[in-house]
Image (cartoon, helix red, strand yellow):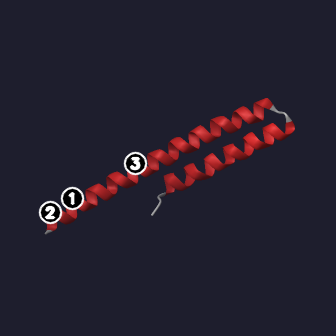
Amino acid sequence: MKNQDELKGKAESMKGRLKQAAGDLSDDQRLHDEGVADEIVGKTEETFGRTRRKVGEAIDDIADDLKR
């Protein structure tokens, strides 16, 4: 199950892609560049969330193994 960081990152990335498309359609380079930056931030946050979730799952697995 995805955590909040992953979900926020996915939303930020989508927002960035929308800004890029809007910038392309309106021929607004600044808006397009903002979209690129937003997409990078979103992907970074999503990756951080995924890593955080995987580490948590690994810790849970180790704890389960120790309980046996």
Horizontal side of 20 relative to 26 (left or right) equals: left
Q: Which mark is residue 66?
A: 2
Tell me which residue sits at (47%, 46%) in the image.
Answer: 47
Circle 2 crowding by C-alpha within 10 Å: few under 14, some 14–19, many from 20:
few
Q: Which mark is residue 62?
A: 1
Q: CA distance from mark 1 to mark 2?
A: 6 Å
The quadrant of the rendering that contains the C terminus is bottom left
Horizontal side of 61 relative to 28 (left or right) equals: left
Residue type at mark 2?
Leu
Where is residue 45 drawn, in percent x and y? 51, 45
Residue type at mark 1?
Ile
Residue 65: name its quadrant: bottom left
Q: Are marks 1 and 3 in contact (CB under 8 Å)?
A: no
**Of callouts 1 and 3, which one flags the residue occurring earlier in the amino acid sequence?**
3
Horizontal side of 67 relative to 7 (left or right) equals: left
Residue 39: name its quadrant: top right
Q: CA distance from mark 2 to mark 3?
A: 23 Å
Where is residue 36 drawn, in percent x and y? 66, 36
The quadrant of the rendering that contains the N terminus is bottom left
Q: Secondary structure at mark 1?
A: helix
Where is residue 21 drawn, in percent x and y? 76, 43
Q: Are marks 1 and 2 in contact (CB under 8 Å)?
A: yes
Residue type at mark 3?
Thr
